[in-house]
Amino acid sequence: MKRRTGICILICILVIIFSGGLYAWFSSQKKPIEVQPTEEENLELALESAMSQEFYAYIVFDRDGSLSVYYGDNETLYMETGIITSTLPEEIQSQAKEGIRFQTLEELFDFLESYSS
């Protein structure tokens, strides 16, 4: 009887050691769980991103050798200025090719006034 009890205890100890080893091995194999943002959190992030970007109401471009003013959508023409691009400083000419952006109508007219004849 003592021998049978000793064997049972030995088997139990071996099972415990084996299961602990398996647990350690499987836990090291697991990848960390990535928490996906909810739809509401995605919307909040999108709003924060949009609010942090600067809005430009007017953009001045060099079009066919003269300055043209477009609304902030880059497509809708606001006005043709009649200011010839070649008469402007080189820095302004290069900026006008990419677009010179203004947030207010006052800023736009101050710029145009400084370069009109």
Image: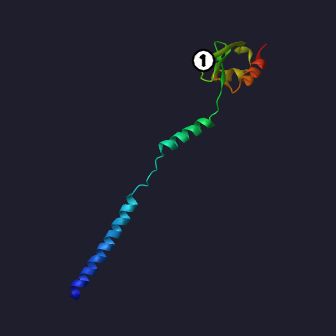
Tally the numbered discs.
1
Residue for point 48% across, 42% down: 39
Looking at this view, name the residue that lies furthest to the front: 40
Residue for point 74% across, 14% down: 87
Residue for point 77% across, 15% down: 116
Using the image as rendered, state which of residue 63 and residue 73 is in the foreground: 73
Could you tell me the amino acid type at mark 1?
Answer: Thr
What x and y, as percent, mark residue 70?
A: 64, 19
Q: Is residue 4 above or below residue 108?
A: below
Image quarter of the C terminus: top right
| Element at label 1 | loop
Residue for point 32% across, 73% down: 16
Q: How is the image coloured?
A: rainbow
Quarter-of-image position of residue 65: top right
Q: Which residue is mark 1?
A: 76
What x and y, as percent, mark residue 12?
A: 28, 76
What x and y, as percent, mark residue 37?
A: 48, 46
Using the image as rendered, state which of residue 77 and residue 68 is in the foreground: 77
Using the image as rendered, state which of residue 63 and residue 80 is in the foreground: 80
Quarter-of-image position of residue 31: bottom left
Q: Is residue 113 left or right of residue 32?
A: right
Q: Is residue 72 left or right of residue 38?
A: right
